[in-house]
Image: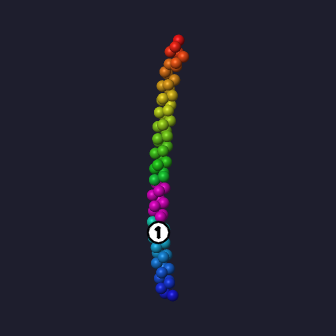
Amino acid sequence: MISEFQQLAKKVDQLATLTQTMRGENTDLRHKIAELTATNAALSSRIQEAHERVTALLEKLPSAEQESE
């Protein structure tokens, strides 16, 4: 009976250790997600700005119809 309780106590300790490890990993992953989300937003903004600049430049170029006249 005592041996069974010792085995159970050992398993509970292992579970507690694993839970703490996973909580730490979860926290790290949440920070990484926040960091990557911010990076993604910054890159999306840069892409939008580049798109707007290219569009503005294309509007300034003469069209094929204007060149033929």
| Magenta residue span | 22-31
| Residue 9: percent from left, percent from top | 48, 79
Q: Nearer the viewer, residue 65 or 52?
A: 65
Name above or below for residue 37 compared with residue 52: below
Residue 30 inside the magenta-drawn segment: yes
* Residue on which the image places disc 1: 18
Give amino acid for label 1. Leu
Residue 68 inside the magenta-drawn segment: no
The residue sitting at the right extreme is: 65
Q: Residue at x 51, y 23 (%)?
A: 59
**Residue 65 lies in quadrant:** top right
Q: Residue at x 48, y 68 (%)?
A: 19
Q: Residue at x 48, y 51 (%)?
A: 34
Q: Residue at x 46, y 73 (%)?
A: 14
| Residue 1: percent from left, percent from top | 51, 87
Colour scheme: rainbow
Tally of marks: 1
Q: Magenta-highlighted stretch: main secondary structure?
A: helix
Name above or below for residue 43 compared with residue 29: above
| Residue 29: percent from left, percent from top | 47, 56
Q: Nearer the viewer, residue 3 or 38?
A: 3
The residue sitting at the top extreme is: 69
Disc 1 secondary structure class: helix
Name above or below for residue 40 compared with residue 17: above
